Image (tube, rainbow, N blue to C red):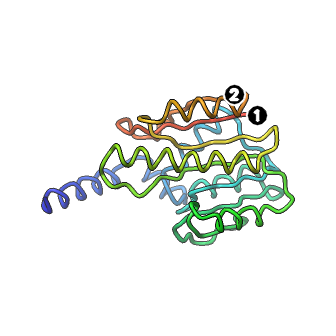
């Protein structure tokens, strides 16, 4: 089993560093290839505008936050959170901690203060065990927590963007989102690897 894991890791590393989006991110000064997923969604749906306040859940290493600071401008705000440390970014307020903990969610709320939150976005994913059924349930549980949090902070006009993995619980989550928002879209950016089950849910206009 051990040699198989080593071979798998080597294959992943080879694929990762030959990935055109990884190379593009490095050349452009972005911290992750994930920035191009958000950019594609933004180009298509025009979600973020100057002056907005955005909460970025699962932000590390910071690719999405980097792009968001450009989109919301100097008068906007980006409040980022992750369980992993993240190197500082200009105009990004970062909170490190486990989103599963109420204390960390409260810290995010305190950072927001009296500001109107326009978007809650989440690229969070659980620590994968390699057991698909377990990982899928963990992913959906994390997504449900993010949705609950978004509903706490978003006004009627607010929006919610989240990474999901298709599988058990996906349709139920989609149904729940549709009951809470006026319009729900599913996006599969080109920067998402074709074999990946990940998609992005865009929910507009909280009910």
**Label 1 with label 2: CB-CB less than 8 Å:** yes
Is 177 left or right of 71, judged from the image as shown? left
Quadrant of image for the N terminus: bottom left
Residue 115 in percent (x, y) is at 85, 57
Q: CA distance from mark 1 to mark 2?
A: 7 Å
Question: Which mark is on residue 148?
Answer: none
Element assignment for label 2: strand
What residue did someone put label 2 on?
Answer: 183
What residue did someone put label 1 on?
Answer: 205
Residue 92 in percent (x, y) is at 69, 64
Is 41 left or right of 129, judged from the image as shown? right
Which residue is at 53% across, 53% downward?
124
Which residue is at 60% across, 70% downward?
96
Residue 206 in percent (x, y) is at 75, 36
Element assignment for label 1: strand
The tally of labels here is 2
Which residue is at 69% across, 47% downward?
150
Q: Please, is residue 31 above or below residue 199 in the view?
A: below
Q: Earlier in the sequence, mark 1 or mark 2?
A: 2
Q: Please, is residue 54 above or below residue 185 in the view?
A: below
Quadrant of image for the C terminus: top right
Task: Please tell me which residue lies in front, 137 or 47.
Answer: 137
Instruction: Assess disc 2: are there few (<14), some (14-19) or many (≥20) residues with their C-alpha within 10 Å of its C-alpha.
Output: some
Which residue is at 76% across, 50% downward?
153
Task: Please tell me which residue lies in front, 72 or 134.
Answer: 134
């Amino acid at each position: 089993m051990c040699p198989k894991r080593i071979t798998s890791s080597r294959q992943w590393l080879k694929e990762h560093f030959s990935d055109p989006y990884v190379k593009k991110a490095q050349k452009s000064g972005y911290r992750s290839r994930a920035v191009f997923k958000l950019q594609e969604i933004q180009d298509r749906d025009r979600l973020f505008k100057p002056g907005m306040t955005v909460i970025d859940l699962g932000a590390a290493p910071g690719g999405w936050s980097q792009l968001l600071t450009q989109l919301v401008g100097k008068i906007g705000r980006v409040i980022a959170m992750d369980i992993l440390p993240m190197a500082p970014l200009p105009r990004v307020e970062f909170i490190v901690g486990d989103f599963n903990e109420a204390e960390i969610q409260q810290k995010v709320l305190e950072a927001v203060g009296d500001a109107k939150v326009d978007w809650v976005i989440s690229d969070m994913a659980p620590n994968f065990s390699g057991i698909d059924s377990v990982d899928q349930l963990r992913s959906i549980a994390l997504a449900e927590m993010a949705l609950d949090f978004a509903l706490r902070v978003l006004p009627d006009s607010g929006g919610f963007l989240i990474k999901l993995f298709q599988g058990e619980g996906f349709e139920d989550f989609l149904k729940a989102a549709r009951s809470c928002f006026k319009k729900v879209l599913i996006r599969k950016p080109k920067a998402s690897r074709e074999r990946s089950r990940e998609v992005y849910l865009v929910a507009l206009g909280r009910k």
